[in-house]
Image (cartoon, rainbow, N blue to C red):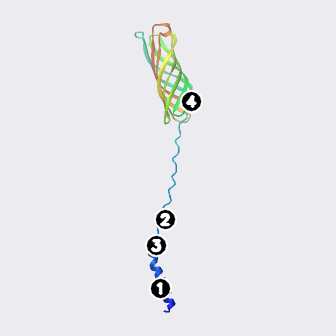
Amino acid sequence: MTHFSRVTFAAAAGALAAAPALAGTMEKPAPQPEIQTPAPAMTSTDWTGPYVGGQIGFGDVDTSAPGVSGDGALGGITFGYDHDFGNWVFGGGVDYDVTDITIAPGTDVDNIWRAKLRGGYKVGSGLIYGTGGFANIDVDTVGDDDGYFIGGGYEHMITDRFSLGGEVLYHEVDNFAGTPTDVEATTVQMRGLLRF
């Protein structure tokens, strides 16, 4: 073997011997950061707009006159307008119910109508609210008279245009139709509303 060949062989052998050592000292590449996909933003139900619908339920009428009271079914129509202020919703509406309530032999409550204000707090797709306003109760043999009502309810959006809910109202009319008789009525109703 010539001197040149011995030098070349020694250099090649040294390079091969050093290769594993150099390979072991190399650092691993840093992992690439994961790209986080943002969660979809929560959308809130918008209650702003007019509505119209129907309601049906049960009513209990009591009076200060002995033995003059009764209960039965009632139902009717409702319409109004709500405005959404973020977490809070305020609005107004009108209800009209016909009733099947006999309070004495030959004496029936014919209908009840209301002009109402309401305000409530949004819970997801639902609305918990309080309501109150003007009420008129019509008794077929005596006539009609004005009073007030208060109550509350819950309404839930089934779609962006249709909601279902329930409502409990307490009504009071003092000295009904000029008589010394006071009238109280409690109604419990389910409501279905079409919104625009």
Q: How crowded is mark 3: few (under 14 residues within 10 Å), some or many (20 or more)?
A: few
* Mark positioned earlier in the residue sequence (3 or 1): 1
Residue identifier under label 3: 23
* Mark positioned earlier in the residue sequence (3 or 2): 3
Disc sitting over residue 29 in the figure: 2
Disc sitting over residue 10 in the figure: 1
Task: Tell me: residue 69, above or below residue 46.
Answer: above
User: How far apart are the two marked residues, 2 and 1, measured between alpha carbons?
Assistant: 33 Å
**66 or 83, nearer to the observer:** 83
User: How far apart are the two marked residues, 1 and 4, measured between alpha carbons?
Assistant: 91 Å
**48 or 140, nearer to the observer:** 48
* Mark positioned earlier in the residue sequence (2 or 1): 1
Residue 10 image position (x, y, % from top left) = 47, 85
Horizontally, residue 196 falls left or right of residue 5, namely right
Q: Do the residues labelled 3 and 2 touch (CB within 8 Å)?
A: no
Residue 18 seen in the figure: yes
Residue identifier under label 4: 83
Location of the C terminus by quadrant is: top right
Residue 138 image position (x, y, % from top left) = 51, 14
Given the image, on which type of amino acid does mark 2 rest? Answer: Pro
Extreme residue toward the left, this view: 66
